[in-house]
Image (cartoon, grey):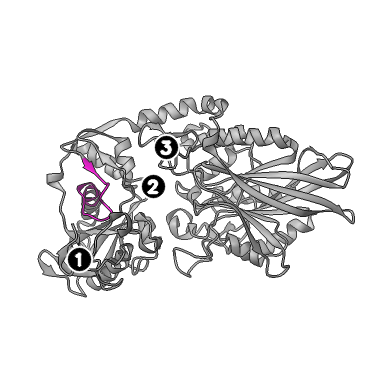
């Protein structure tokens, strides 16, 4: 067993032995009712401050949302002042360690595993005073050693009951905590909190966790631990889950359900509330009926990036000598209604400034402006740049192997509609704005028939529009809720997508070097780890033979490629190889 898993097991065992972290007194009213408040953030994704590193400006979007832990800190301080700090608890439902250049810098440029510097997310969360945080799937992106270092730096316990050692089956992280709230002149209130992470980690970060960790079903894990927590005298039991509430999965049925938050509430008796994340939705308050008890269970999700804070109010009443929850409600607070906490801004300054300096380094000169605005429905030069870098990397890597003679194709999706390479100096920030995920590159082999299936599946992204009907780009894409990052475009072959046809019958004229692609023709395909491991549910790719996997981060490869050449000239890589048509007539 690796040392970090062994350490994590020790942490989990120690936490079970040392439950019951006291907080000051809550006040009982004369009729033996007590009110307590629980706050929850989720999916912070490296947003410490209200700053957009890709735009090098204060964060803003069309809804004028604000982001960051400095905003959350102000909201938390206000609730603590309003309700009494001794009546309140604060949790986070995961996805903290990936998402901004700030996170990237302290994972890859000056990794905390080597520098021994405190990770900015640990620094901010410690200062705010979280009671516990739950592991999200993105906590595993930078490997288990970095995660273990961050956990050591965190003052709050880091929870993940369903992440277990692959060898012993024992919890690899702290499963739950108990908090004790003293009540003046009455018995204390015990609050138990179970943390659950996402089973998709086994797919999405296979390279980091395979053979080391297993990720169990959320419902089954809750069924095991909730009675334990109740048995230890918990008056309130909450679950903090890094899982959406839809009951659906993006990766099929090979693994336990991805978005199981509501299923946990429905199927596990003894839970009062579920604080959840992962889906990036704002759910101020939702009630689900538990099938066994008929009791209503409260669910809440605070959007993403620190844009919202969930606030849950519990009323506890003393009945037959026991506290029990007699009323509960929740809402979400908007971070744009408050200023940043200056204490957090000051605390983050040096790490923030270092990150700003890093992202503004110029790495190349672009011959012309390249924009991603039309990438979801047109073949654009800026996405072709990703294809060019991926194709070159995989082609070089397979030289001298049995696959060296096969054509190399490449897959890329329009991650960002706002990405631009300006004419002139292009910075790390511009490149990171184009490729916003920390994906790594693989090469797999596929047949012509499989590639056709893959493209047909991808083309479900478009609404069906009859020949001659007006085309509105606002409603043309994202059909069936398909996100931009699940619309894959393929380079190295030519094809049309007929949007007048139903899903599954849209790919027309699939050719390689002017000849129709044969069903049994073999290709090497450059693909990112998210897609290859099952993200988005695309056909064939998870079982396709892997011929290249050197764990090269695609964004870093783009940066290094631009740095090495010093010039970005679309004449050397732009190639319009696909287009939207209706009955053979181009849409654009």
Q: What span is in magenta?
A: 370-388
Q: Is residue 587 above or below residue 21?
A: below
Say which element carries label 1.
loop
Residue 132 in sight: no
Q: Could you tell me residue 415's position as x and y percent?
A: 34, 50
Q: How busy is the neighbourhood of tag 3: few (under 14 within 10 Å), some, or many (20 plus)?
A: some
Q: Are marks 2 and 3 in contact (CB under 8 Å)?
A: no
Left or right: residue 132 compared with residue 30: left
Q: Residue at x 24, y 61 (%)?
A: 470
Q: CA distance from mark 2 to mark 3?
A: 23 Å
| Residue under label 1 | 468
Residue 143 x %, y %:
47, 48
Check disc 2 and report its element: helix, strand or loop.
loop
Query: What SS does tag 3 mark?
Result: loop
Q: Is residue 37 left or right of residue 28?
A: left
Name the residue carrying label 2: 438
Q: Quadrant of residue 53?
A: top left
Where is residue 241 drawn, in percent x and y?
59, 54
Q: Is residue 464 in sight in this rendering? A: yes
| Residue 84 image point, x, y percent | 73, 35
Residue 330, numbered circle = none
Residue at screen point 38% across, 60% down:
482
Where residue 60 is drawn, which disc sits there? 3
Please tell me whether residue 251 is drawn above or below residue 33 in the rendered image: below
Instruction: Indicate the quadrant containing the C terminus: top left, top right, bottom left or bottom right.
Output: bottom left
């Amino acid at each position: 067993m690796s040392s970090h898993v062994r350490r994590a097991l020790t942490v989990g065992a120690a936490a079970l032995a040392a439950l019951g972290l006291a907080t000051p007194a809550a006040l009982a009213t004369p009729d033996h009712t007590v009110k307590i408040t629980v706050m929850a953030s989720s999916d912070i994704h490296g947003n410490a401050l209200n700053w957009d590193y890709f735009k090098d400006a204060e964060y803003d979007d069309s809804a004028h949302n604000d982001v960051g832990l400095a905003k959350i800190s102000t909201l938390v301080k206000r609730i603590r002042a309003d309700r009494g700090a001794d009546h309140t608890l604060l949790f986070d439902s995961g996805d903290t360690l990936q998402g901004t250049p700030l996170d990237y810098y302290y994972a890859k440029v000056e990794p905390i595993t080597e520098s021994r510097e405190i990770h900015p997310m640990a620094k901010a969360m410690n200062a705010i005073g979280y009671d516990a945080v739950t592991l999200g799937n993105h906590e595993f992106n930078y490997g288990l050693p970095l995660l273990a270092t961050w956990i050591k730096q965190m003052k709050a316990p880091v929870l993940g009951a369903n992440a277990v050692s692959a060898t012993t089956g024992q919890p690899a992280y702290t499963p739950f905590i108990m908090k004790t709230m003293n009540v003046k002149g009455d018995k204390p209130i015990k609050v138990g909190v179970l943390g659950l992470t996402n089973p998709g980690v086994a797919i999405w970060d296979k390279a980091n966790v395979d053979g080391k960790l297993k990720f169990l079903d959320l419902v089954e894990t809750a069924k095991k631990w909730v009675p334990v927590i109740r048995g230890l005298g918990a008056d309130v039991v909450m679950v903090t889950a890094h899982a959406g509430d839809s009951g659906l999965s993006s990766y099929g049925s090979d693994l336990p359900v991805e978005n199981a938050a509501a299923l946990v509430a429905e199927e596990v008796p003894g839970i009062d509330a579920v604080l959840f994340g992962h889906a990036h939705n704002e759910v101020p308050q939702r009630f689900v009926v538990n099938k066994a008890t008929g009791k209503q269970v409260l669910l809440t999700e605070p959007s993403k990036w620190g844009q919202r804070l969930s606030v849950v109010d519990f009323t506890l009443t003393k009945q037959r000598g026991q506290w029990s929850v007699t009323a509960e409600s929740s809402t979400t607070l908007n971070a744009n209604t408050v200023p940043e906490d200056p204490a957090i801004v000051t605390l983050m300054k040096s790490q923030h400034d270092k990150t700003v300096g890093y992202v503004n380094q110029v790495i190349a000169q672009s011959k012309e402006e390249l924009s991603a605005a039309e990438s979801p429905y047109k073949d654009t030069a800026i996405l072709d740049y990703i294809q060019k870098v991926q194709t070159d990397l995989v082609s070089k890597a397979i030289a001298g192997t049995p696959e060296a003679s096969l054509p190399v194709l490449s897959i890329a999706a329009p991650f960002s509609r706002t990405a631009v390479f300006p004419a002139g100096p292009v910075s790390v920030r511009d490149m990171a704005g184009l490729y916003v995920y920390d994906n790594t590159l693989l090469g797999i082999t596929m047949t012509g028939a499989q590639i056709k299936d893959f493209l047909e599946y991808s083309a479900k992204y478009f609404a069906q529009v009859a020949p001659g009907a007006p085309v509105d780009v606002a409603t043309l894409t994202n059909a069936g809720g398909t996100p931009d990052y699940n619309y894959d475009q393929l380079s190295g072959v030519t094809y049309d997508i007929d949007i007048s046809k139903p899903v599954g019958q849209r790919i027309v004229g699939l050719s390689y070097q002017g000849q129709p692609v044969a069903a049994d023709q073999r290709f090497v395909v450059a693909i990112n780890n998210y897609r290859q491991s099952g993200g988005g549910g695309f056909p064939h790719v998870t079982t396709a033979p892997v011929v290249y996997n050197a764990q090269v981060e695609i964004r870093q490869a783009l940066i290094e490629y631009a740095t090495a050449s010093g010039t970005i000239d679309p004449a050397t890589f732009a190639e319009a190889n696909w287009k939207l048509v209706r009955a053979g007539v181009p849409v654009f």
